[in-house]
Image (cartoon, rainbow, N blue to C red):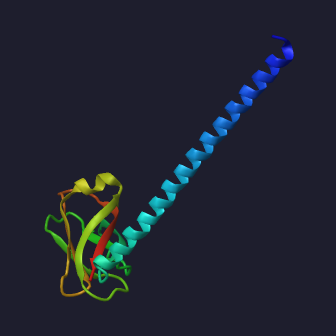
Amino acid sequence: MSRIPKIALITVAMCFVVVLLGWAGVAAHSRYSAATERITELETKVQELRGTAHPRWRTRTGTFSISTTDRPPASNHTALRLVFDTNAPQSFVDHIFKETGHSVAAWVSNWTPRSEMSKFEQFTVWPSHDSNQFEIVAKARAGESIAMEFTIRFIVE
C-alpha cells in the first residue's frame, strides 16, 4: 500500500474513534443529568410529604451555655449557672423563644467541648407537654468545673 491510502485509513479510523467517544460522552452526560433531575424531583416530593405528614409540628433549636461559678446568675437566660461544689441536682426552667404551642420532644443535639458532658452525673432535658417550656436538670460530679455550650432541639406542636 502506498503512503497516502494508509494515512487516509488511519485518519478515518481516528475520526471514527473520536466520533464514537463523543457519542459515548453525550450518552453518559444525558444519563447523568436525567438521574440528577430525578433525584431533585424525588427530594421535592419528600419535602412535600414531610410537610403534609405532620404539618402542625415544627422544629426549633436553642443554644445555651452552662458553667460552674460562684458569681450570681447573668441576666441572659441562655447562660445557665451551676452552683459550684454542690452535689445536688439543679433545675432550670425556660421557654422556647418566640414560639407558641407546646413542646412534644426535646433533646441535646450537640455540645462543646465534647469532654464536658462526662463531668455530669446527670444532664437531662424534659419538655413541658402543656406549654412551650422545658426543664434542664443538671448534676455535676463532685469537684468538677464545667464550662459547656450546648444546643437543644425541640419539636413543637
Viewer-closest of 67 and 9: 9
Residue depicted at 56% across the width and 45% down the height: 28
- Residue 143 in the image, given as x and y percentages of width and height: 21, 56
Q: Residue drawn 46% across and 60% down?
A: 38
Determine the image quadrant of residue 99: bottom left
Counting from the top left corner in percent of width and height, residue 76 is at 38, 79
* Rendered position, 60 above or below 9: below
154 versus 123 height, above or below: below
Q: Please provide percent x and percent y for residue 67.
A: 31, 65
The quarter in which the C terminus is drawn is bottom left
Q: Is residue 61 visible in this depiction of the protein?
A: no
| Rendered image quadrant of residue 110 | bottom left
Which residue is drawn at the image coordinates 36% and 83% (left, top)? 97
| 4 vs 125: above or below | above
Q: Is residue 63 left or right of residue 9?
A: left
Q: Is residue 18 above or below residue 134?
A: above
Which residue is farthest front? 1
Along the line of sight, the residue nearer the viewer: 17 or 71 = 17
Q: Can the viewer see residue 96 in this picture?
A: yes
Residue shown at the point (14%, 64%) measured from the top left:
87
Q: Nearer the viewer, residue 87 or 76?
A: 76
Q: Position of residue 62 (x, y in %)?
A: 36, 73
| Residue 42 occupies quadrant | bottom left
Count all numbered tags in the image, as a single digit. 0
- Quadrant location of the N terminus in the rendered image: top right
User: Seen from this angle, which residue lies furthest left?
Assistant: 88
